[in-house]
Image (spheres, rainbow, N blue to C red):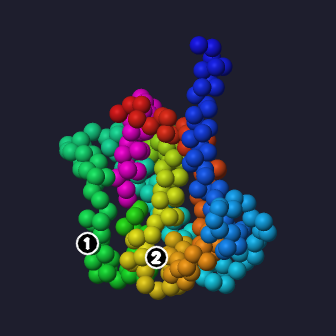
C-alpha cells in the first residue's frame, strides 16, 4: 500500500472521530449566543438567527462570576504547583534511589489509584473539619496536592533518565538537592507539562469536593457557580445562560492545553518507555 494512501486511510477515521468529540463543545459554543427559545426549538436550530451576545454580559449579573474565577484560579493553580512538586520529587526518589521497601511503597501508591474517591470522602472531610479548614482555601487545596497518578507518571518518566548522568553530577560534588533541581527537574519538563494539563483540567472542573467543603458563597468555585445557574434557571427556557456559563468556564482549560500541547505529546510518548 502506498504511504500516501495509507496515511489517508488513517486520517479519515481520526477526523471523523475528532468531529464527534468536538461536537458537544461546538454545540455549547453556538448555544451560548442563542435565545432560550432557539435552544429548545424542535426541529433543532443549529445556528442562531439573531446572536444574543448580551448573554455574556447578563451572566455576570446573575452570579458573582468574577469572584468565582478568582477562587478557581487560586485553588487550581496552587494545587497544580503542589502536584507537580510532590510528584516530581517522589518520582525521582522512587526511580533513582535504592532503599528497602521501595517496590512495596510504589505498589501501595499504585493501589491508591484503585480506591474510589468516595471511600476517602468521609474521613477526609472529618480531618478537614477538625483542622478548622472548612470554607478555606487550605481545605480545598491541601487534600489534592499529592496524587498517586502523578507520582506514577513521574516515576516512569524519570526511570528513563540515565543513571550515569546523576553519578557524574555527584562525583563533581553536587548535593542531592542540586542534582534534583538543576538536572532532574529540567529533564522532567515534558512529563510535567502532561501532568500539569491533567491536573489543571481535573481540578478546574472539580465539583464534589468543593461542594462539601464550601458552604460560604464567597468561597464558591466556578463549577459550583454553574450549579447555581442550574438552580436559578431550572426550566428549559433558560438553558442559554447555562451554556454561556459553561463556555466561559472552559476557556482557561483550552488556553492551558494550547500552551502546553507540544510538551504534553512528548511527555506522554516518552513516559513508560523504561521502568
Instruction: Give the residue furthest to the right.
Output: 50
Q: Mark 1 points at which residue?
A: 123
Q: How far apart are marks 2 and 1 (CA)?
A: 19 Å
Q: Name the residue under label 2.
A: 137
Q: Is residue 10 above or below residue 83?
A: above
Q: In which quarter of the image is residue 153?
A: top left
Q: Residue at x 40, y 51 (%)?
A: 150
Question: Do tag 2 and tag 1 residues touch (Cβ < 8 Å)?
Answer: no
> Regarding mark 2 in the picture, which secondary structure is present there?
helix
Q: Is the magenta stretch mostly helix, strand or loop?
A: helix
Q: In this view, does 212 lie above or below 34?
A: below
Q: In this view, does 156 lie above or below 54?
A: above
Residue 245 among magenta residues: no
In the image, which residues are magenta? Answer: 146-167
Q: Residues within 10 Å of mark 1 (few under 14, many from 20)?
A: few
Q: How crowded is mark 2: few (under 14 residues within 10 Å), some or many (20 or more)?
A: some
Amino acid at each position: 500500500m502506498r504511504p500516501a494512501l495509507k496515511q489517508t486511510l488513517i486520517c479519515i477515521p481520526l477526523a471523523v472521530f475528532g468531529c464527534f468529540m468536538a461536537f458537544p463543545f461546538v454545540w455549547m459554543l453556538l448555544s451560548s449566543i442563542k435565545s432560550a427559545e432557539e435552544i429548545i426549538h424542535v426541529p433543532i436550530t443549529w445556528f442562531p438567527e439573531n446572536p444574543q451576545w448580551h448573554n455574556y454580559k447578563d451572566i455576570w449579573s446573575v452570579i458573582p462570576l468574577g469572584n468565582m474565577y478568582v477562587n478557581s484560579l487560586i485553588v487550581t493553580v496552587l494545587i497544580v504547583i503542589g502536584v507537580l512538586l510532590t510528584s516530581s520529587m517522589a518520582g525521582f526518589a522512587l526511580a533513582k534511589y535504592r532503599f528497602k521497601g521501595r517496590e512495596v511503597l510504589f505498589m501501595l501508591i499504585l493501589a491508591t489509584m484503585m480506591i474510589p474517591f468516595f471511600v476517602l470522602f468521609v474521613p477526609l472531610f472529618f480531618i478537614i473539619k477538625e483542622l478548622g479548614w472548612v470554607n478555606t482555601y487550605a481545605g480545598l487545596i491541601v487534600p489534592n496536592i499529592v496524587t498517586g497518578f502523578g507520582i506514577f507518571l513521574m516515576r516512569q518518566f524519570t526511570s528513563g533518565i540515565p543513571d550515569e548522568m546523576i553519578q557524574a553530577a555527584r562525583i563533581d560534588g553536587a548535593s542531592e538537592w542540586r542534582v534534583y533541581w538543576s538536572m532532574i527537574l529540567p529533564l522532567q519538563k515534558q512529563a510535567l507539562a502532561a501532568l500539569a494539563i491533567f491536573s489543571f483540567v481535573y481540578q478546574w472542573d472539580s465539583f464534589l469536593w468543593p461542594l462539601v467543603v464550601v458552604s460560604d458563597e464567597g468561597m464558591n468555585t466556578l463549577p459550583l457557580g454553574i450549579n447555581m445557574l442550574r438552580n436559578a434557571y431550572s426550566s428549559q427556557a433558560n438553558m442559554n445562560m447555562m451554556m454561556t456559563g459553561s463556555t466561559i468556564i472552559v476557556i482557561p482549560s483550552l488556553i492551558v492545553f494550547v500552551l502546553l500541547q507540544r510538551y504534553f505529546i512528548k511527555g506522554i510518548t516518552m513516559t513508560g518507555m523504561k521502568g
